[in-house]
Image (cartoon, rainbow, N blue to C red):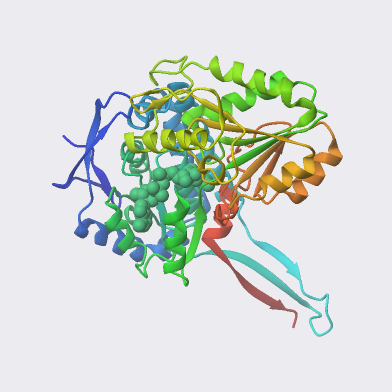
Amino acid sequence: MPTPYWVAGKPRTSDSPVTVRSPYDAAVTGVTSNATAADIEEAVAAAAAVRDEVANLPAHVRADALDHVSRRLAERLDEVAALITAESGKPITWARTEVTRAVATFRWGAEEARRFSGSVQRLDTDPGSEGRVALVRQVPRGPVLGITPFNFPVNLVAHKLAPAIAAGCPVIIKPAPATPLSALLLGELLAETDLPPGAWSVLPMTNEQVAALVGDPRLPVISFTGSDAVGWRINDSHPRKHVLLELGGNAPVIVAPDWADLDGAAARIAMYGTHQAGQSCVSVQRVYAHTDVYDEFVPALVRHVRALPTGDPAHPATHVGPLINADAARRVSDWVADAVTRGATLLTGGRTNGNAIDPVVLADVPAGCAVVTEEVFGPVIVVERVASVDEAVATANRSRYGLQAGVFTHDLRVAAHATAKLQVGGVVIGDVPTYRADQMPYGGVKDSGVGREGVQSAMLDFTEPKVMVLTEF
Ligand code: NAD
């Protein structure tokens, strides 16, 4: 029996089966099916029909539903984490971390649903507005289409569901084709709540189906997380929609000359340049090490990378598992080989085994190589010697991406200066850029996207201010 998908809160299957296989050993993880055209129409029509009802649901109803999902997800943590590992190849320890974060994301949704209130503004700051005050409410924009990638198949779905429901917007989730099963499991938990059936759907579909759906005028908000090529195409094709884009990155980290614990920095960079086989939008990709520390730092980095356990993602000790599919593994290997052909030094890694690649550290990489200019989305770390933090910042900024950066420094002046100058959505001081707290504003500049996630930030994006001006008579 295939895993059902969810149309306006009801389970359904179709005769378009989708077999989900482990990227590690191709074992069948499960079977679901793609939604039919009639199902998609039913979900959209239902979302449009309950638009006002969901907008007017009392905050306690929305919050209770999200609290329920959070609680049930915590109860089913082992099962959900195992499913993430089986369908995405994410090592089980990281899969458990992801579910723990998603539990918190839904809990934040519940809390923000209770708190989200708009504001009161005095207007008598200018002549002619004496005796006037504005009540500013955040009004839901309407149904949200949430399109999600494979690399965090539960928490990134949570980052669409929780703020949409908390803000009072119906929501339709289109999960990644490689990892639909964990999103469908979240549907099971939503089905246990009192939300009106039309308030949510989870619909696996083909890319052609979703490409057509983004143009539907009944879906005013598109919240997309995925590659920049697809995201910007959606944005550019639908200029009158509210399109929010959480896209790729090519995260830089700077090791400043004052950083004392070089071995510690090397250990963190090794771990977060390779975790999830580098398939994280803020995976460390480019390291700019100051010339004063470079010669001590780089051997430590190579040592730590070589020590990382690779292999079966179901094994609790495994740190680096497979890439999502053979095409991805081939692309990453080709980019590494191309860099080496053009003069780069391969310090470690690069051996392939199925869809897995032993983590790679490259030095002396010529500018213009894809491992520097593009998002590698694989376990590849490029190190570069720089003469100053200013040079590091300027080189980091040459990327077309701008999601997050990290700076290892104890010096507050360096931290403040680098934060001001780096063209990114966030800077992590004293650590790698691979950090996201689920309540903080998170997102990128330049090609990395537009808009911010983090439950409260997404709620602001899913709503628009509506003002009532009160006049003293
Ligand atoms: P992808 O762009 O291939 O797919 C993302 C989603 O878009 C999938 O659900 C896919 O089916 C759908 N899609 C494909 N074609 C479409 C179309 N024409 N119209 C509408 N939807 C379409 O990305 P992926 O390979 O699943 O994920 C990896 C990418 O996601 C990386 O670039 C990564 O950096 C990015 N990402 C960004 C963030 C962030 O928060 N900024 C987080 C995670 C991943």
Residue 371: x and y in percent read: 52, 39
Residue 410 image-quadrant placement:
top right
Quick one: which residue is furthest to the bottom in this view?
Answer: 128
Q: In this picture, is 245 found above or below 152? A: below
Q: Nearer the viewer, residue 195 or 287?
A: 287
Residue 108 image-quadrant placement:
top right
Residue 321: x and y in percent read: 42, 24
Q: Is residue 356 left or right of residue 288?
A: left
Name the image quarter holding the C terminus: bottom right
Residue at 60% over, 47% down:
403
Residue at 62% over, 57% down:
117
Q: Is residue 246 left or right of residue 39?
A: right
Q: Is residue 440 left or right of residue 14?
A: right
| Numbered disc total | 0
Q: Nearer the viewer, residue 309 or 128?
A: 309
Confirm whether residue 417 shows in the render.
yes
Confirm whether residue 148 shows in the render.
no
Q: Nearer the viewer, residue 167 or 203?
A: 203
Residue 392: x and y in percent read: 73, 41
Residue 252: x and y in percent read: 64, 39
Q: In this picture, is 300 found above or below 123? A: above
Residue at 32% over, 57% down:
210
Residue at 77% over, 50% down:
420
Q: In this picture, is 440 found above or below 118? A: above
Name the image quarter holding the N terminus: top left
Q: In this picture, is 372 found above or below 174? A: above
